[in-house]
Amino acid sequence: GAGVSQSPRYKVTKRGQDVALRCDPISGHVSLYWYRQALGQGPEFLTYFNYEAQQDKSGLPNDRFSAERPEGSISTLTIQRTEQRDSAMYRCASSLSEGDEQFFGPGTRLTVL
Amino acid sequence: LAKTTQPISMDSYEGQEVNITCSHNNIATNDYITWYQQFPSQGPRFIIQGYKTKVTNEVASLFIPADRKSSTLSLPRVSLSDTAVYYCLVGGWDSNYQLIWGAGTKLIIKP
C-alpha cells in the first residue's frame, strides 16, 4: 500500500511569500503529525490532528504557522510571510491512532531566500 | 514532558551486538518508550516500543528496568546497513502524545 506522501518535495521561495505544504497520510490513519527537522537534529514537533480536529498546536513557532485537516485526511501546513529562519525539512507522519507507530513521509525541503 | 538523554555517538563492528542506553528520569506513569531509526535523507522509522520489562521483535530488543528511568535498545549482530541515527522517545496519554525528539545517537558500524 501507499505510504505517507508529501508535496512538493522541494520548495524554494522568497522571503515574505506564503507557502503551503501538503501531506497525504496513509489511508485510514486517524492521527497526523507535523514536524520540522534541522540538519543534524531530531524532529521538532509542530502540531497534530486526530481526524479533522487539531489536538495540540503548542509546537507551532508563531502565528505565521497554521495547519488544517478539514476532512480528516489530507493536511496542509501553511507558513505566511516566510522568513529565512523557516528554512528546514518539514516532515509529516501518520499513525493508525494516537500513540501508535508513526509512519513518516519523505519530507518537504523548504528554502527561503 | 519527559525528556531523554542518550549518547551522541557510538561505534561498533559488523556482527557485534550493540546496546544503546537512554535515560528518562521523569517518565510519567502512562508514558511508553519508543525507539526510531533514521537514515540520511529519510524520515524516521519505528523500531520498537515498550512499557516495562523486555520487548523483542524481529529487529531489536528493548530492556526496561522496573523503575523505568532508563531503557536499552539492543541490536543483535549489526551490519553496515545499521549505520543510522537512533532516537529514544517517551510519551503517552499524560503528555498528550507529544513526543520530544532529542538529537539521537549516531551509530556507526565499521567493517
Image (tube, coloured by chain):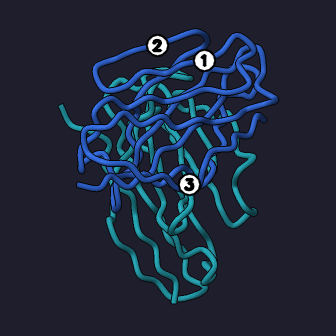
Q: Secondary structure at mark 1?
A: strand
The quarter of the picture where residue B48 lies is top left
Dot 1 crowding, Cα within 10 Å, few <14, some 14–19, many 20+: many
Q: Amino acid at mark 2?
A: Val
Q: Secondary structure at mark 2?
A: strand
Is residue B66 visible to us here?
Answer: yes
The residue identified by callout 3 is A42
Residues under numbered marks 2 and 1 in contact, where contact means CB atoms less than 8 Å apart? yes
C-alpha gap between disc 3 and disc 1? 23 Å
Q: Amino acid at mark 3?
A: Gly
- The chain under label 3 reads A
Tell us which disc is closer to us: 3 or 1. Answer: 1
Name the residue located 52 percent from the left edge and 70 percent from the top edge.
A88
- Residue A42 position, x and y percent, is 56, 54
Q: Colour of chain B?
A: blue
Q: Secondary structure at mark 3?
A: loop
- Residue A103 position, x and y percent, is 38, 36
Q: Is residue B13 left or right of residue B10?
A: left
Question: Quick one: which residue is furthest to the right in this view?
Answer: B26
C-alpha gap between disc 3 and disc 2? 24 Å
